[in-house]
Amino acid sequence: PLASQKEVHSTSDEVVEIHANVDDQPGEGLGYAMEQLMAAGAYDAYFTPIFMKKNRPAYQVTVITTSGQLTAMVDLLMTHTTTFGVRWVTMKRATLPRTFKTVTTQYGDVTLKIGNRGTQSKVTVEYDSAAALADRHHISLDQVRHAALLAYENELG
Amino acid sequence: PLASQKEVHSTSDEVVEIHANVDDQPGEGLGYAMEQLMAAGAYDAYFTPIFMKKNRPAYQVTVITTSGQLTAMVDLLMTHTTTFGVRWVTMKRATLPRTFKTVTTQYGDVTLKIGNRGTQSKVTVEYDSAAALADRHHISLDQVRHAALLAYENELG
Amino acid sequence: PLASQKEVHSTSDEVVEIHANVDDQPGEGLGYAMEQLMAAGAYDAYFTPIFMKKNRPAYQVTVITTSGQLTAMVDLLMTHTTTFGVRWVTMKRATLPRTFKTVTTQYGDVTLKIGNRGTQSKVTVEYDSAAALADRHHISLDQVRHAALLAYENELG
Amino acid sequence: PLASQKEVHSTSDEVVEIHANVDDQPGEGLGYAMEQLMAAGAYDAYFTPIFMKKNRPAYQVTVITTSGQLTAMVDLLMTHTTTFGVRWVTMKRATLPRTFKTVTTQYGDVTLKIGNRGTQSKVTVEYDSAAALADRHHISLDQVRHAALLAYENELG
Amino acid sequence: PLASQKEVHSTSDEVVEIHANVDDQPGEGLGYAMEQLMAAGAYDAYFTPIFMKKNRPAYQVTVITTSGQLTAMVDLLMTHTTTFGVRWVTMKRATLPRTFKTVTTQYGDVTLKIGNRGTQSKVTVEYDSAAALADRHHISLDQVRHAALLAYENELG
Amino acid sequence: PLASQKEVHSTSDEVVEIHANVDDQPGEGLGYAMEQLMAAGAYDAYFTPIFMKKNRPAYQVTVITTSGQLTAMVDLLMTHTTTFGVRWVTMKRATLPRTFKTVTTQYGDVTLKIGNRGTQSKVTVEYDSAAALADRHHISLDQVRHAALLAYENELG
Ligand code: NI
Ligand code: NI
Ligand code: NI
Ligand code: NI
Ligand code: NI
Ligand code: NI
Ligand code: NI
Ligand code: NI
Ligand code: NI
Ligand code: NI
Ligand code: NI
Ligand code: NI
């Protein structure tokens, strides 16, 4: 509890969540729009299936960004989706302070992201470094991920 | 078990389930396509959200129909969706033998569909008759539905 | 950038997004509720599939409306859905200033909605006018839409 | 309208809606996380399917809670999901004042939840009491639910 | 390729996939139905969100079972869902031959399922044994899972 | 009708639809699996959100392929997903005979796919050629698509 309160308080900041409902654009155009949003620095952009009036299967486009990037992201949504309107809300956010570390596995080097949770830590495997090794060795992503986590455990002793 | 086997055996027939994946058509065009499919006599037409390659949020269009209607339904899919290909499979089907019955409620008459399950029966309220009364009385659909089920129970004694 | 900032600033206003989670009402009752919400003037009402406790497949009902309409919309949700509670948040909104224009195609007249984005414009085809022509000529909605966009391009020269 | 305005005003309070997007954790771990969140007193916890970058099918985890429980819920999300960040927003909420009542059916006693809407009331069947009877009698949940609603109607006269 | 062909051929058998579309039953009744289907021995039962006519957000119920269990499963669907009809198709199936093995971790004993893929093997952690330890130690499911996989790797040397 | 019957009959062939339900693998591993399946020549590979037992939000992985590729695709699913079993069914398929054509727009050359439907034709814009021009000119995919369709109409006269 004490540890976790510190987590929330010390790292909380704000993000903006932008929503647009799209029922008049093909999915491939939305896929293209996501690439533009991510390339422009959105924290995240994703699609949620929704069901709208007149039997229209649609998607809600959500973008997570900063208030400083809001105007640029709204502009990209206006350009790359068919929407005539977007809405947004500011949300509080808590994130774990993180460090990066490289471990060596039988497949090659893999980057880990390590979150600091007071006396505990939280580890995740960076996708790009693991996917590159999976590609090279023709194995599954999970095999590389588990090898990296094993290497990390062994280093910790 | 004996009763239910009879159910399955005595009423089983076949339907065709047609699938088309659509990632290059707006949702409003799909809503329009659904209307055309239903108007042409499809048993059912519905959309399932699916996630396709290149980050494309898409929809699978499914049509349930008879083998006799297959060609007409494929033609409608080719006309009203952007797909260049559809696939289908024949499925066995079991349906309950059914009768219709009208009951009188404080809001007006409602039609019930009654399925025969041997010694048991299964009752459902026909949407259109209930929705008309809900509209007229400015109440919820559920209020009409429960009044109709109550009237049915009371008639049975 | 300059243009888009102006867009956001000059047209931003507020909407309210209302959420209710429904796991104890049939889908046909929700479809009926959507009709009541739209008829009462909601900007939008839509369903999002969600997965709740005790293996319950459910739907989140979302309504987009104004603060002035909030009470009426909450009342409709309480009447037409089974929910005992709803929640809402005010969101900022940016919309493009828009004008309407009619173009003539080989199928008949179609209404376009044109959004003003500074030096650029954004065009979309009004569904009802296009669907009416698709119905009359037994063609797809997309065929009418593209004919309308073509007529618009040709007018612009 | 008068009645419903009172509803909204007299019972409105606040809840916090917390979001986390998860694309690097198996579904079974998320199911386990939901149990921990509900056991710790979340009003609700649910999953929404979303589609994220790099063709990743993912889930948004949403938790509805109070501001007093926020820190504890964020801590549970950090412990039981793989996320490195969560975001939240405070929402207004309106709930119906409610009472509970037991009715006797041919299957046993069932608890009803009754919402007070001024001159109207709204009734729902408590799941656990109905499911227990359905289990004991090997019948469907709906059969018990309708028997309970019928008993309630008959008591009201 | 040789190995995998053997996999498919030596272990292929048949399953039946049953579908029912449900738009007139609350989600909590479907959750109850799933429990009945699983308790009766279905290989799997799950819900897919679908969007049906008249703006109805609905769910497709799917049951995976054997041809020997088909009648019993159809009967359960007729009893515990509101559907008046179900459809099914026989599918070929390939499964990995599997063995079970217990490993010891710092949290207690965990059961692993090991699939034989010729020269390779595939390992997964049995949910119930891992969830019990996560509950006892107040840690995440993933922590137990990774400890178990680590123990397995170390045993293999 | 005559035309469409010919369509179905002259071009019908068979595809295999493979299903695997995955509730114990992260979404990023599934995104990686999709890339492997598409690179190996699957006609299509996609994810459908499903809700499984024990509150598990999951995904059904579907692969569309030929009977000749079945073994290879099953092997890839066994390697790149956590599943211990897959199932498949053979489906009939109808596809439009198609030709490709390049048109010149103000942005550059775009490839069109043209389906032959007897006296009618059906046109779609090839994604990769359009996306390349959208990237180069910093415009939306839809702008390039509509320019290409306009160029096609003008060539037809
Ligand atoms: Ni949100
Ligand atoms: Ni399918
Ligand atoms: Ni929300
Ligand atoms: Ni006609
Ligand atoms: Ni278009
Ligand atoms: Ni029993
Ligand atoms: Ni009911
Ligand atoms: Ni199906
Ligand atoms: Ni404890
Ligand atoms: Ni793992
Ligand atoms: Ni299936
Ligand atoms: Ni540039």
Image (cartoon, coloured by chain):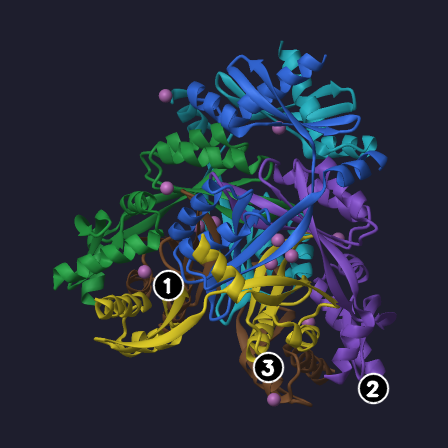
Chain colours: A cyan, B yellow, C brown, D green, E blue, F purple
Residue of label 2: F157
Location of residue D44 (image quadrant): top left
Residue of label 3: C130
Name the residue at 55% across, 71% down: B43
Q: How many marks?
A: 3
- Identify the secondary structure beneath mark 3: helix
B12 up-or-down from F17: above or below: below
The crowd level at tag 2 (other Cα within 10 Å; few <14, some 14-19, many 20+) is few
Marks 3/1: CA–CA distance = 43 Å
Name the residue at 40% across, 71% down: C35
Q: Is residue D67 visible?
A: yes
Q: Amino acid at mark 3?
A: Ala
- Identify the secondary structure beneath mark 2: loop
Location of residue F115 (image quadrant): bottom right
The crowd level at tag 1 (other Cα within 10 Å; few <14, some 14-19, many 20+) is some
C27 or D83: nearer the eye? C27
Marks 2/1: CA–CA distance = 61 Å
Q: Are marks 2 and 1 on the same chain?
A: no
C103 or F69: nearer the eye? F69
D68 up-or-down from A33: above or below: above
- Identify the secondary structure beneath mark 1: strand
Q: Amino acid at mark 1?
A: Lys
Q: Is residue C93 visible?
A: no
Q: Where's the N terminus of chain A, which quadrant?
A: top left
Residue of label 1: B122
Residue A86 is situated, as x and y percent measured from the top left of the image, at: 52, 60
Residue C37 is situated, as x and y percent measured from the top left of the image, at: 37, 68
